Image (cartoon, rainbow, N blue to C red):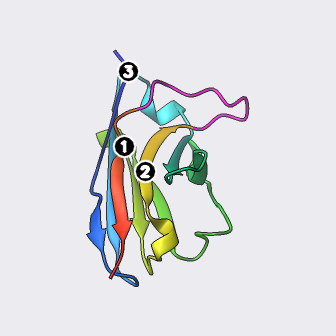
Amino acid sequence: QVQLVESGGGLVQPGGSLRLSCAASGIIFRLNAMGWYRQAPGNKRELVASISSAGRTNYADSVKGRFTISRDNAKNTVYLQMNSLKPEDTAVYYCNVKYDSGFTLPWGQGTQVTVSS
């Protein structure tokens, strides 16, 4: 059974940092490109960062230089280090596979990130 479990969200002041984690099960994790997505109220879900099976990373322009995606294949876990957080980063963050076809696995519950003073 495929399962994606996100954690690490919370309330943080502007300029602060958070580290999100996503534990995956039911897939051959090391063979899959993974992505972090976010959805703010009233907005569509968007991809913010991705990492290939070989470790190549890509970022949305809005988070480039502030967010870092990484993976630990031994732990079947993908991480998102978020620094210099801004109020516009407020959203529910999800992880999932990242394929050019747009294929995704069933979504997890996500983790809420709120950036506010």
Task: From this view, report whether residue 58 is shown above or below residue 103.
Answer: below
Main secondary structure type of the part rendered in magenta: loop
Q: Earlier in the sequence, mark 1 or mark 3?
A: 3
Say which amino acid is labelled 2: Tyr
Q: Which residues are magenta?
A: 98-107
Mark 3 or mark 2, which is nearer to you? 2
Q: Earlier in the sequence, mark 1 or mark 2?
A: 2
How far apart in space, not on screen, are marks 1 and 3 (Cα)?
Answer: 15 Å
Q: Which residue is mark 2?
A: 93
Q: Is residue 35 left or right of residue 14?
A: right
How far apart in space, not on screen, are marks 1 and 2 (Cα)?
Answer: 5 Å
Q: Are marks 1 and 2 in contact (CB under 8 Å)?
A: yes
Q: Which residue is mark 3?
A: 2
Helix, strand or loop under label 3: loop
Q: Earlier in the sequence, mark 3 or mark 2?
A: 3
Q: Name which residue lies at 29% across and 58% down.
A: 9
